[in-house]
Image (cartoon, rainbow, N blue to C red):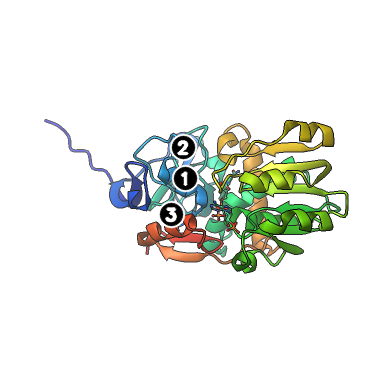
Amino acid sequence: MSIPITEDMMRAVVVKQPGPVEALEIVEVPEPTPGEGEIAIDVEYAGVGFVDTLFRAGAFDFPVPFTPGIEVTGRVRSVGPGVTGFEPGRPVGACLNDFGRAARAGGYAEVAVAHATMAVPLPEDADRARVAGALVNGVTAWMALHDLARLRADEDVVVLGAGGGLGGTMCRMAAAHPARKVIGVVGSEAKRPAAPAECTDVILAADLDDALRRLGGGRGVDVVVDPVGGDLRRRAFEHLAPFGRLLIVGDASGDDTALPGDGAWLNSRQVIGLSVGGVAHLVPQSVATASAAVIGLLHRGVLNEPVPAVVPLSQVADVHAALESRTAPPKTVLAVRE
Ligand SMILES: NC(=O)c1ccc[n+]([C@@H]2O[C@H](COP(=O)([O-])OP(=O)(O)OC[C@H]3O[C@@H](n4cnc5c(N)ncnc54)[C@H](OP(=O)(O)O)[C@@H]3O)[C@@H](O)[C@H]2O)c1
């Protein structure tokens, strides 16, 4: 006689085959359980980023079926073996882009599993929608500007895609660090209001060369943050001062234009890449430190992340469509339990 196995079920967005927004299906699936070193989270809010659209569309070789979503907040549901400091019921935020350890994301679901080193306890009164919208971009910005670029207070930073999610957080993190100038670059006049108020200057991509010649004062700029790629990346690189750093953190344009290596050599410039999801398992302490720094800066009002647009899980396809048409608000989070 077979013993029936009863599994607790949950509501989740599932991608069975990568494709257009219609690939996002809301279905009932078994709840995940935490393994060694992991925690399960009752998800309240899941942040949505452009990278989620890339996963959904099949830009990465990711095993199917999967649930997108790489940043969540909620309460600890249960903990796996070996985990301390995350008692059930405690408010928590977690990045789920720990791809070196587990090829999963899982945020757009009522229950998600995170490695404990990717999770951070939250104050009881933390705004959990805001934190869910700030985690991945905040951690990326901290690691890029603090750990890698080692940004100094007398340096000038240019941020491409300043009206976008990661670009906006980069501007605010650079201002908080602080940097001297924070120059935001947007694609059109219509996007100008989307650049953070923390920018000392906002320029149009079409005017990049003239504007950076003027703002760089003949020396150039110290740091360029690039989540966009393409021709803009190549042009911005040309405006780096000696020992200036180009931080490549994304490719929203999908155009990986080659950079001239001799330009780095002859002008003593550095090109630095960062994919948090690719290295999180190698530098768990750096991710944990960055997460704690972001939560602390947010909670004290130093990192002024915007209140995100909050939409129910059922509108996930609309959110992806808006990101792909470049009409999305700076950040959107899904209210998973509404
Ligand atoms: N390194 C990491 O660990 C990490 C972490 C998070 C995100 N990312 C990456 O960062 C990139 C940006 O993500 P995001 O969430 O900030 O996206 P987003 O909110 O959509 O912002 C991207 C910005 O790029 C600009 N852009 C220029 N050409 C574009 C094009 N052809 N299509 C779309 N946008 C274009 C847009 O600004 P204008 O319209 O003003 O030009 C847009 O505001 C993605 O490649 C993502 O994978 C990397």
| Badge 3 density bin: few <14, some 14–19, many ≥20, Cα 10 Å | many
Residue 261 vs residue 225, the one in the foreground: 261
Q: How many callouts does the rendering have? A: 3
Is residue 232 depicted above or below 256 in this figure? below
Indicate the amino acid at tag 2.
Phe
Confirm whether residue 337 shows in the render. Answer: no
User: Could you classify mark 2 by the number of other residues whose Cα lies within 10 Å: few (under 14), some (14-19), or many (20 or more)?
Assistant: few
Among numbered discs 1 and 2, the one appearing first in the sequence = 1
Q: Nearer the viewer, mark 3 or mark 2?
A: 2
Q: Secondary structure at mark 3?
A: strand
Residue 77 x %, y %: 42, 50
SS assignment at label 1: helix
Residue at 48%, 39% in the rendered image? 38
**Some atom of ligand 1 lies within 8 Å of the CB belonging to the residue at label 1:** yes
Residue shown at 72%/48% (left/top)?
A: 236
Q: Which residue is mark 3?
A: 43
Mark 3 vs 2, N-terminal side:
3
Circle 1 residue: 54
> Cβ of disc 3 within 8 Å of ligand 1?
no
CB under 8 Å between callouts 3 and 2? no
Q: Helix or strand or loop: what does disc 2 sit on?
A: loop
Residue 295 in picture, x, y percent from top left: 63, 55
Residue at label 2?
60
Residue type beneath disc 3 = Val
Asked if residue 114 is positioned above or below residue 298 in the image, the reply reads above
The answer as to whether callout 2 falls within 8 Å of ligand 1 is: no
